[in-house]
Amino acid sequence: MTAFIDKLAAAWRANDSLLCVGLDPDLAKLPPHLRGQPDAIYRFCKDIIDATADVACCFKPQIAYFAALRAEDQLEAICGYLREKYPHLPIVLDAKRGDIGATAEQYAREAYERYGADAVTVNPYMGFDSVAPYLEWQERGVIVLCRTSNPGGSDLQFLQVDGRLLYQHVARLVAEKWNTNGQCGLVVGATFPKELEQVRAIVGDMPLLVPGVGAQGGDVQATVKAGRTANGVGMMINSSRAILYAGSDENFAQAARGVAVKTRDEINFCRNPI
């Protein structure tokens, strides 16, 4: 076990939740009273965090939404706030980095040092060289893209490799060769429950980051049935837009909490049916 895996397991238990709240701030969708404020993104994300922290197992800021707005300083502040106020909840930086060598080393430093992330998403399609620099941070999580939630993922992920589909090859490679420190997870979309079930069968209890419920339309019941471990955990089921933009006025955080609670409860009903 690594610090990240232990922290995630503790959050599953403490909050009785598999819900991952994605932080994808879009200026056009922020409540009117925040628009034009120099710290609008920080204030928006902070209020979402405070409203949902007790029903989430982790938070997943998507770095592109901050970088495109030149708001990396606000992302740093948000990660700092999470570490200070909610140190028991993992920060999963969604960056999908995929370079090699010294460049990958710098991306790892960015994620783990600059932002203090507990885990980061990475793209394995340049091979082990693109993942190795992250694995050197043995206390942190490395979450490898496997079967992504977008339809176009099939263009590559369904190619045949030695008698199995490429995403299955990736799952096996990570589980059997790369996860030597017990720090790895995989990204598998809720939009493909059959493939999610197959990945779970390959990787055992490895944690899965599962995007695609909420705005992308993934079915919660099918997702939980396909991806849960024997003890009913094993997943970070992400919802971003459906929670973030549940409300559009000054009560946006309360509206976000309502959707987060509903999603958490739906997940729990499916993993612990009466």
Image (cartoon, rainbow, N blue to C red):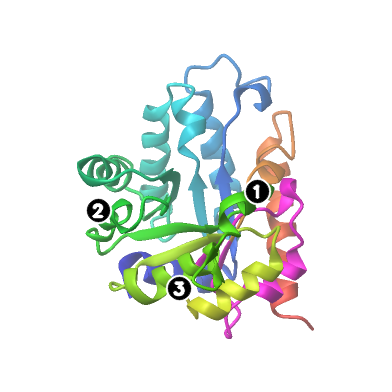
Residue at 20% x, 42% y is 102
Q: CA distance from mark 2 to mark 3?
A: 20 Å
Image quadrant for the C terminus?
A: bottom right
CB under 8 Å between discs 2 and 3 = no
Upstream in sequence: badge 1 or badge 2? 2
Nearer to the camera, 200 or 49: 200
From the image, tell me which residue sits under label 1: 150
Residue at disc 1, secondary structure: loop
Nearer to the camera, 163 or 131: 163
Q: Which mark is residue 252?
A: none
| Furthest residue toward top | 36
Q: CA distance from mark 1 to mark 2?
A: 27 Å
Other residues around mark 1 within 10 Å, as few (<14) / some (14–19) / many (≥20): some
| Furthest residue toward right | 274
Answer with left or right where residue 122 lies relative to residue 14: left
Q: Which residues are magenta?
A: 208-236
Q: Which mark is residue 172?
A: 3
From the image, tell me which residue sits under label 2: 133
Check the image and report above or below for 261 versus 41.
Answer: below
Q: Is residue 29 magenta?
A: no
Residue kind at label 1, given as amino acid type = Asn
Question: Given this view, does label 2 or label 3 mark the residue nearer the observer?
Answer: 3
Image quadrant of residue 104?
Answer: top left
Residue at 74% x, 36% y is 247
Residue kind at label 2, given as amino acid type = Pro
Q: What x and y, as percent, mark residue 191?
A: 71, 57
